[in-house]
Amino acid sequence: MPEFSIQVASSKHHQYAQAICDEMAESAKARGTGIAKRSPEYLRMKMEEGKAIIALEKNTQQVVGFCYIESWGHQKYVANSGLIVFPEFRKYGLAREIKEKAFELSRKKFPDAKLFGLTTSLAVMKLNSELGYHPVTFSELTDDKEFWKGCQSCVNYHILQSKEHKNCLCTGMLYDPAEKKRKRWSFLQKLPILKRLKKLKEATFLTKFSKVFS
């Protein structure tokens, strides 16, 4: 089994930008859906900003996967975009590892932002769910017009237009850090009650136990 290096991309990875763009286009064509078209120059910019994850095969230093992050709505929303794994390397779980790295990078750079994505892939939906995303309506995603312009290159854009940008064939998914904090705080508030219940059960058990042997 080949070994891989998955890391935050930088300017030293500029040489891979064209191959990544080509694979993004081929991947979208194979799925029959669109993907926001990005130029090699745009991907190089993401690399320089430290806003991309790249996967390389260790021995050959061949690029085998990629993903980048973008912020929208004055950094209130962040999307992990352009996730690809080159066809011959799709059986090693790379998509999951790249997605997890992109998630960690997004949380580090934009800790208060809502993370979101649009996808038609069941595999990506499963990965997102495991990271804490949940399906939402498009109204809960960013209203940044520049983001939605990226959908114009999709073969299903006419559907999005006909639905007045309310839904499409893609599923919208969202991770809200504020919601996670609320749930965590709610759980912590319940801890004293749980402790009292535990003590009550222990006392009841000890009472029964003492009666048996008295």
Image: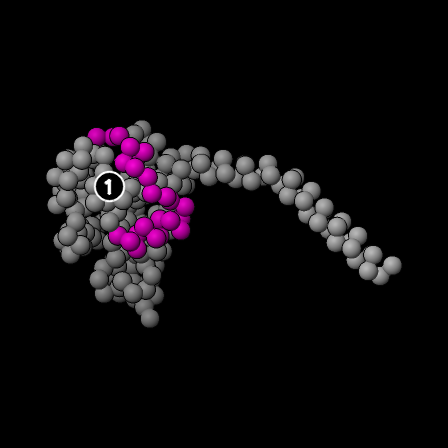
User: Which residue has dot 1 on it?
Assistant: 45
Task: Please tell me whether residue 127 belongs to the stretch shown in magenta.
Answer: yes
Q: Tell me the residue at 32%/64% (across/down).
A: 92
Amino acid under label 1? Met
Q: Is residue 14 visible?
A: yes
Q: Secondary structure at mark 1?
A: helix
Q: Position of residue 49 (x, y in %)?
A: 30, 40
Q: Position of residue 35 (x, y in %)?
A: 18, 46
Q: Tell me the residue at 79%/58% (across/down).
A: 209
> In the figure, 139 relative to 5: above or below?
above
Q: Position of residue 22 (x, y in %)?
A: 15, 53
Q: Tell me the residue at 71%/49% (across/down).
A: 201
- Work out whether residue 45 or residue 74 is closer to the camera in this orientation and state it: 74
Q: Is residue 51 visible?
A: no
Magenta residues span 121-145
Task: Please tell me whether residue 112 belongs to the stretch shown in magenta.
Answer: no
> In the figure, 158 relative to 100: above or below?
above
Q: Tell me the residue at 30%/55% (across/down).
A: 123
